[in-house]
Image: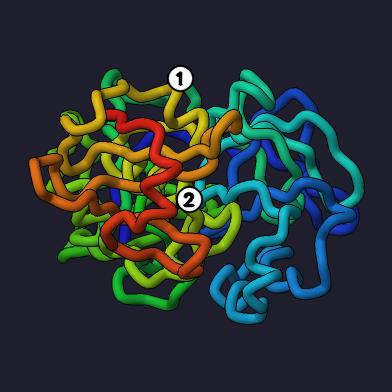
């Protein structure tokens, strides 16, 4: 089945004798797996982390194999979604030090979040030949389903399962019988997914009810430090991923999310705002999404990935949490 004529895309990839992609320092690369975990250092990787490595990373199996202590190990920094671009700053056998340019982390690197990725999970970022590109490129799509599967053809064999909500995809043509073709890094021909699993890239700010509805889909997902998928997620990952679904690019960490949003007086917060928490004299360490607007006699409630519960919950703020509430902000 032909999709039509589209801009010529080149990956620029070259293969080493071992079959691995040759990434160049100073150039961009793109994530070729559904979820790539960003590591503090290759030497920090543990035996339990094996399912998160390699060309077929499986974040669900990885998290299922960890105990609760391993789920909060500080070797994990963040996670990147399929197609997300990085800047390569260093390479060593099997690994690339990168800057995740779509996840702001100004105190660490003004270009984005720095860390290490397995080279098997990257391909050189595709480029569009400007001579072949149409005058107006089609706007990107964003995955709206909690997860979806990319297939070789409409209703055909699965090629990439568990593509995560908020993943941005480049359309490869119009829908055909309820299926949409998309360009995917590392795949020379389009892959297909159900048309209803994606939506056009948003052009307006989301309503509070839309934000809460998306975040609520992660209720009961396990708390995993650095996680940013329905397999496991942390507090700032939940906020980052929720707003990414609506085309809003917030920083990755809670403190930077506070710096990038607008403070509102406590007592005037609305549903969809953010609560931030810090201990006296310390940096912000936690963030949650307000679910109940402020009103006299109304208990404060929020939806958040909770370290104590080790899962995503919607709950009233207990006394120990209220004691560290320092601000409410609006996105």
Residue at the image position 30 percent from the left and 46 percent from the top: 289
Tell me the quarter of the image containing the N terminus: bottom left
Q: Earlier in the sequence, mark 1 or mark 2?
A: 1
Q: Which residue is mark 1?
A: 130
Residue 225 visible (yes or no): yes
Residue at the image position 25 percent from the left and 31 percent from the top: 266
User: Which residue lies most toward the left here?
Assistant: 296
Q: Helix or strand or loop: what does disc 1 sit on?
A: loop
Q: In the figure, residue 125 lies in which quadrant? A: top right
Residue at the image position 23 percent from the left and 49 percent from the top: 300
Measured as percent of width and height from the top left, residue 282 is found at 60, 32
> Eyeballing the image, is 23 above or below 41?
above
Q: Is residue 85 left or right of residue 272?
A: right
Q: Which residue is mark 2?
A: 184
Q: Is residue 183 left or right of residue 172?
A: right
Measured as percent of width and height from the top left, residue 229 is found at 47, 60
Instruction: State which mark lies toward you, 1 or 2.
Output: 2
Nearer-the-camera pick, 264 or 135: 264
Tell me the quarter of the image containing the C terminus: top left
Measured as percent of width and height from the top left, residue 235 is found at 46, 51
Nearer-the-camera pick, 141 or 206: 206
């Amino acid at each position: 089945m032909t999709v039509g004529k589209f801009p010529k895309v080149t990956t620029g990839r070259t293969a080493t004798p071992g079959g691995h992609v040759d990434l160049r320092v100073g150039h961009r690369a793109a994530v070729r797996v559904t979820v790539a975990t960003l590591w503090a250092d290759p030497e920090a990787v543990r035996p339990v982390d094996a399912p998160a490595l390699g060309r077929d990373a499986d974040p669900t199996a990885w998290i299922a194999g960890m105990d609760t202590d391993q789920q909060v190990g500080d070797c994990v920094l963040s996670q990147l979604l399929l197609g997300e671009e990085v800047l390569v700053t260093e390479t060593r056998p099997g690994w690339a030090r990168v800057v995740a340019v779509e996840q702001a982390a100004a105190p660490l690197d003004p270009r984005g979040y720095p860390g290490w990725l397995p080279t098997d999970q990257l391909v050189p970022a595709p480029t569009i030949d400007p001579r072949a590109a149409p005058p107006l490129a089609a706007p990107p799509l964003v995955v709206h389903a909690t997860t979806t599967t990319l297939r070789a053809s409409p209703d055909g064999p699965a090629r990439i399962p568990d593509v995560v909500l908020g993943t941005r995809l480049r359309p490869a043509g119009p829908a055909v019988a309820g299926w949409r073709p998309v360009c995917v890094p590392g795949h020379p021909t389009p892959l297909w997914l159900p048309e209803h699993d994606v939506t056009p890239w948003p052009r307006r700010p989301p309503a509070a009810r839309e934000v809460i509805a998306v975040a609520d889909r992660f209720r009961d997902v396990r708390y995993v430090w650095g996680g940013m998928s329905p397999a496991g997620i942390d507090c700032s990952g939940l906020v980052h991923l929720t707003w990414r679904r609506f085309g809003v690019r917030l920083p990755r960490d809670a403190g930077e999310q506070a710096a990038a949003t607008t403070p509102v007086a406590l007592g005037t917060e609305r549903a969809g705002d953010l609560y931030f928490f810090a201990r006296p004299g310390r940096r912000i360490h936690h963030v949650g999404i307000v679910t109940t607007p402020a009103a006299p006699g109304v208990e404060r409630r929020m939806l958040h990935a909770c370290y104590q519960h080790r899962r995503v919950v919607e709950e009233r703020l207990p006394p120990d949490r209220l004691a560290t509430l320092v601000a409410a902000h609006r996105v």
